[in-house]
Amino acid sequence: LRSARRGTGRFFIVRHVGRTTGTVYETPLILAVVPEGFVCELTYGEDVSWYRNVMAAGRCTIVYGAVETEIVAIEPMTPEAGLAAFGFPESLVLRILRRREFRLLRAGRP
């Protein structure tokens, strides 16, 4: 989490609220930056707490350094578009691992 808070490295922080507790959580993820927002790869599928919390709320906040970006929609992506968002060498690793579940985290307008 420290590198994401400093705005260095590959990790971003996804700040989300628990579905049942209302507790604020911060989960580190590797994301790809795209003009519409961010792309994530669901390494462990849809049945993980951070993703279920974000889907239930319909929003979250991405933190990288001093920049906080509000996410207003979560949309499925084709595997091709998701892989392309990550670029080389990440896309090659994701292909080798046969990753196919990508989501666009659409940023709100400032």
Image (tube, rainbow, N blue to C red):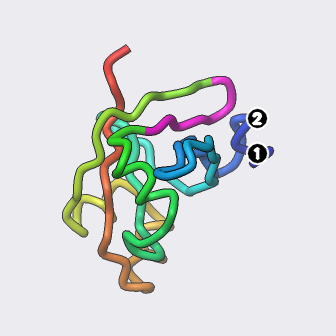
Disc 1 to disc 2, C-alpha distance: 5 Å
Residue highlighted by disc 1: 3
Position of 93 relative to 75 (above/below): below
Label 1 with label 2: CB-CB less than 8 Å: yes
For residue 38, which quarter of the picture? top left
Give the farthest residue toward the right.
2
Horizontal and vertical percent for residue 24?
A: 62, 41
In the image, residue 101 above or below residue 25: below
Q: Which residue does the image show at 31% across and 70% down from the upper left?
A: 101
Q: Tell me the crowding category of disc 1: few under 14, some 14 to 19, or many 20 or more residues within 10 angstroms, Cα based.
A: some
Q: Residue at x 67, y 24 (%)?
A: 66
Q: Residue furthest left?
A: 78
Tell me if 31 is positioned left or right of 3 in this view: left
Predominant SS along the magenta part = strand
Q: Given the current orientation, which residue lies at the most extreme front position?
A: 20
For label 1, the SS is helix
Residue at x 41%, y 68% (from the top left corner): 42
| Left or right placement of residue 67 versus residue 71 in this view | right
Label 2 neighbour load within 10 Å: few <14, some 14-19, many 20+:
few
Query: Which residue position is annotated with label 2?
Result: 6
- Quadrant of residue 41 in the image? bottom left
**Image quadrant containing the C terminus:** top left
Residue 33 on image: x %, y %: 43, 42
The image position of residue 14, as x and y in percent, is 55, 45
Kind of residue sitting beneath label 2: Arg
Is 65 a magenta residue? yes
Amino acid type, mark 1: Ser
Residue 53 belongs to the span the image colors magenta: no
Asked whether, in this view, residue 10 is left or right of residue 74, the answer is: right
Q: Residue at x 39, y 34 (%)?
A: 71
Q: Which residues are magenta?
A: 60-66
